[in-house]
Image (tube, helix red, strand yellow):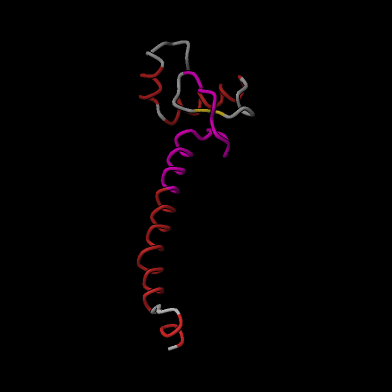
Amino acid sequence: MFWQSWFNVDPHHVLRSLVYDIWPNIAASAILGTAIFWRLYKKDKCASCWRPGVHRVEGTHYRTCHKHSNSVDHKKLREQHRRKYPVEHKLLNGGKRGCN
C-alpha cells in the first residue's frame, strides 16, 4: 500500500491507537470532570435557583445566592425546611421555640 511504502506506517495501527489509547482517556476525563462538577454544583446550589449558593440560611442546610440572600427569602426557606424536614429542623435549631 501507499502508506506502508512511503511512511512505513500501518494505517490500521494508527486507527487502533486512536480507538484504544486516546478515546478511553478522553472519555474517562470527561466522565470524571462531569461527576466532580455535578457533585459540587448539587452541594452548593442555591435553594431557589440555579446559581451557586454562597450564603447559608440559618437553621437549615440550605444555601442561597446573592439574589436570594434577603430576609424574606430566608424566612420562606426556613418555613419550607420546617415542613419538609421536621425532625432535622428541630435538631438544627436545638429545639428552640423561637425558630420555626
Residue 42, above or below 11: above
Residue 74, quarter of picture = top right
Screen quadrant of the N terminus: bottom left
Residue 63, above or below 90: below
Name the residue located 39 percent from the left edge and 57 percent from the top edge.
Answer: 25
Q: Residue furthest right?
A: 67
Name the residue located 41 percent from the left edge and 68 percent from the top edge.
Answer: 18
Name the residue located 40 percent from the left edge and 79 percent from the top edge.
Answer: 8
Judging depth in this view, the residue of 15 and 1 nearest the camera is 1
Residue 38, above or below 58: below
Residue 50, above or below 23: above
Judging depth in this view, the residue of 28 and 47 nearest the camera is 28
Q: Position of residue 72 (x, y in %)?
A: 62, 22
Counting the numbered discs, the total is 0
Judging depth in this view, the residue of 5 and 100 nearest the camera is 5
Q: Position of residue 39 (x, y in %)?
A: 42, 40
Judging depth in this view, the residue of 46 and 35 nearest the camera is 35
The magenta segment = 33-58
